[in-house]
Amino acid sequence: MKLIADTHTHTVASTHAYSTLQEMVHGAAEKGLFAIGITDHGYEMPGGPGTWYFTNLHTVPNRMEGVWVLRGAEVNVMDYEGRLDIPEKDLQRLDWVVASIHSCCMPQGVTPTRELCTQLWLQIAQNPYVNVIGHSGSPAYAYNYERVIPEFGRQGKLVEINSHSFEARPDYIPNCRRIAQLCMEYRVPVVVNSDAHFSASIGDFRAALAMLEEMGFPEELIVNSSKERFCAYLREHTRFQMEGV
């Protein structure tokens, strides 16, 4: 299976990634991708971008080197009420928003129970600015998948299958498989991403695709498996404008 977009990537603005925005776009062009999402971490991630980064991101062209550029963010979930670390005034200017849990941004001294994490994701599902549920397979933040996954589908959220997790977060793999199984069962669309932190890693979906193909996951539920599916999602759920597409 060939995917046409990588919608979760990081640049030097995240400070623990190693390529500039232009280098990331160039990497996407070299891989023959139709689109790339530039999704640097939100403000509260240690070493995250400065205050004006997302406010000014609209100055980046939405098409470079023949690649459509989604100017977005990977926002940090900050608490069990689903609060995010980028304010609404900035979120509403972005083309693409991935919401993820990173333990360094969550309340310390609070045990992340299944009930609290379920509440968290149900709140995120209601957020109109969030497009993607990022790498939610953490065993430390396990939630009621059977309850929440269908709600993601009802609210137009894409569930991310994060290929980087198979290398960097192997303890996520059993939950990633369970999440994918439920997406298949409930017909909830997913997006497969690299979570690239370096330009050479853009479009590296191998680990995630190997799991999905082994499961017999339907290609029609993978939004970035065709231009038609991807563009249809953008038209229905985002502010992104593709002239001539």
Image (cartoon, grey):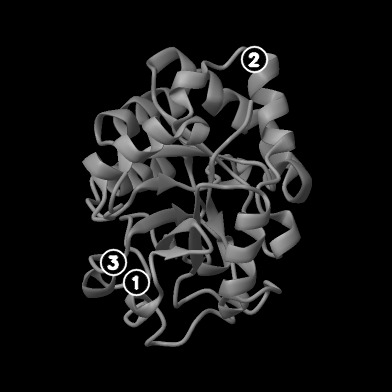
Q: Is residue 101 above or below residue 180?
A: below
Residue 201 occupies quadrant: bottom right
Circle 3: is it few (<14), some (14-19), or many (20+) Cα within 10 Å?
many
Q: Which mark is residue 91?
A: 3
Can residue 144 be seen by looking at this rendering?
Answer: no
Percent x, y of residue 174: 67, 29
Q: Which residue: 54% across, 19% down? A: 181
Q: Which residue: 45% across, 28% down? A: 145
Secondary-structure class at tag 1: loop
Marks 3 and 2, Cα distance to the nearest angstrom?
35 Å
The C terminus lies in quadrant: top left
Q: Are marks 1 and 2 in contact (CB under 8 Å)?
A: no
Secondary-structure class at tag 2: helix
Left or right: residue 206 versus residue 135 is right
The N terminus lies in quadrant: top right
Circle 2: is it few (<14), some (14-19), or many (20+) Cα within 10 Å?
few
Amino acid type indicated by mark 3: Leu
Circle 1: is it few (<14), some (14-19), or many (20+) Cα within 10 Å?
many
Can residue 102 be seen by looking at this rendering?
Answer: yes
Residue 237 occupies quadrant: top left
Which comes sooner in the sequence, label 1 or label 2? 1
Q: Is residue 151 above or below residue 6?
A: above
Q: Which mark is residue 180?
A: none
Secondary-structure class at tag 3: helix
Amino acid type indicated by mark 1: Ile
**Which is more foreground, mark 3 or mark 1?**
3
Marks 3 and 1, Cα distance to the nearest angstrom?
7 Å
Residue designated by label 2 = 215
Residue designated by label 1 = 86
